[in-house]
Image (cartoon, rainbow, N blue to C red):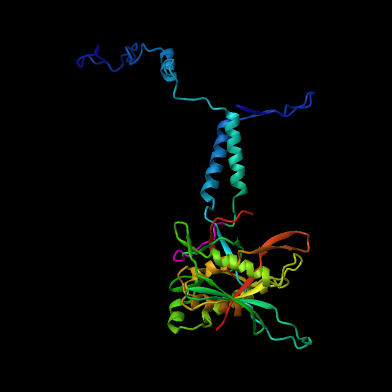
């Protein structure tokens, strides 16, 4: 560009020139290779055997697929802190009744208040809970008329809820046609050597 | 490049060998692992069984035959002790007291009663009515507790109650170790 003065600027002049000096022009490819491989010292990069790497990935995929649960996590009410036990059984698919410090919920739907039971001070049938569970039972029977009704429901009860509330919910579930009641608990590792 | 070598069997057939590109293959595996790890359920919950025995009205078509009542274990949770009472109908067969030796386990201080579990097992061995592996009926236990007892204490007692197990054979020939007792709450 220095060859052209502003006074004699020719717009049709040839503007492509022979390339001049470039940055790192004198550095050879072999130097770069040595630099990367550590100049004879131990390099940072390491060769990985592709066969064993793919084996590892396939085994991980198989393990995760086998332990994968399509049904998803069973939702526990965020206000419920479950107690823990050692002698437990696997969870089954059944209506969930959550009992926290204030409310009773069936599959997330409000079905009564624990405060009312505590204030009354004696066992009682919880009418809303009874109605919801009875409806669920009748719906199940309509959908599967040829199968015997299992009568199983699972109670998620907070660890500090008093026995009076637990017994009231338990009896109400039984009267609504769910005599096989299970309590949801966390599992603690077994101390027995079998 | 990785290759899948399948013998083409000779002749002029089209070759069945094919190369697969390793980069998308490894990408696929990585994405699958990431998906499965994200959707994995790490906390598992379990359950403890109970049974509400709600007697229905008697069948009018069936003739009732008087039967000897079975022995039932009545477990009372008191303030400082447990009492294990075996009853046959209204007759008290035996009664023992177990001191409430509470043991706290883990960081969350889970309550456990190992002494109670041991005593329940001894009591069942001495008084239990259903022991044969072909007998699928369980001995019954009725739990008596104060209305103010917190649920975690009830679960600790249930855990002790379900500690003794026996082998039960099923009609298909399989067998399983199950707790010797079935529990229900007293209704007062």
The part of the image, by quadrant, that contains residue B140 is bottom right
- Count of labels shown? 0
The percent position of residue A4, horizontal first and vertical second, equals 24, 13
Residue A34 is left or right of residue B61, and the answer is left
Residue B85 visible? The answer is no
The percent position of residue A95, horizontal first and vertical second, equals 58, 69
Residue A114 is left or right of residue B69, and the answer is left
**Above or below for A10 versus B29:** above
Taking depth in this image into account, of A139 and B137 the one nearest to the observer is B137
Taking depth in this image into account, of A87 and A51 the one nearest to the observer is A87
Question: Which range of residues does the magenta coloring cover?
Answer: A72-80
**Above or below for B75 versus A46:** below
**Above or below for A189 versus A122:** above
Quadrant of the snapshot with the C terminus of chain A: bottom right
Residue B63 visible? The answer is yes
Residue B184 is left or right of residue A75, and the answer is right
Main secondary structure along the magenta-highlighted residues: loop
């Amino acid at each position: 560009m220095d060859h052209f003065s502003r006074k004699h600027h020719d717009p049709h002049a040839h503007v492509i020139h022979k390339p001049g000096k470039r940055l790192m022009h004198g550095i050879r490819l072999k130097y770069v290779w040595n630099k990367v491989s550590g100049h004879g010292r131990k390099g940072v990069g390491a060769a990985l055997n592709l066969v064993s790497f793919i084996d590892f990935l396939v085994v991980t995929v198989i393990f995760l697929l086998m332990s994968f649960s399509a049904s998803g996590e069973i939702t526990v009410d965020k206000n419920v802190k479950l107690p823990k036990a050692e002698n437990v059984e696997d969870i089954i698919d059944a209506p969930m009744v959550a009992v926290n410090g204030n409310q009773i919920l069936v599959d997330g739907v409000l079905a009564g208040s624990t405060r009312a039971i505590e204030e009354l001070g004696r066992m009682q049938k919880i009418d809303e809970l009874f109605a919801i569970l009875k409806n669920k039972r009748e719906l199940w029977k309509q959908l599967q008329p040829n199968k015997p009704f299992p009568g199983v429901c699972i109670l998620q009860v907070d660890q500090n809820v008093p026995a009076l509330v637990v017994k009231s919910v338990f009896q109400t579930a039984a009267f609504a046609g769910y005599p096989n009641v299970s309590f949801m608990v966390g599992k603690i590792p077994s101390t027995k050597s079998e | 490049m990785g290759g899948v070598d399948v013998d083409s069997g000779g002749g002029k057939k089209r070759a069945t060998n094919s190369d697969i590109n390793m980069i998308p293959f490894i990408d696929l595996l990585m994405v699958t692992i990431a998906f499965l790890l994200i959707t994995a359920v790490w906390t598992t919950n379990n359950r403890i069984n109970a049974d509400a025995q709600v007697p229905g009205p008697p069948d009018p078509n069936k003739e009732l035959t008087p039967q000897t009542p079975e022995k039932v274990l009545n477990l009372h949770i008191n303030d400082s002790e447990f009492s294990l009472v075996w009853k046959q109908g209204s007759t008290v067969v035996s009664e023992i007291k177990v001191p409430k030796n509470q043991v706290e386990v883990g960081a969350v201080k889970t309550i456990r009663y190992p002494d109670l579990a041991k005593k329940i097992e001894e009591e069942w061995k001495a008084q239990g009515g259903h022991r044969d592996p072909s007998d699928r009926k369980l001995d019954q236990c009725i739990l008596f507790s104060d209305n103010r007892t917190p649920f975690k204490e009830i679960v600790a007692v249930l855990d002790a109650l379900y500690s003794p197990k026996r082998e039960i054979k099923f009609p298909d020939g399989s067998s399983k170790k199950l707790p010797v007792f079935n529990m229900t709450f007293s209704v007062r």
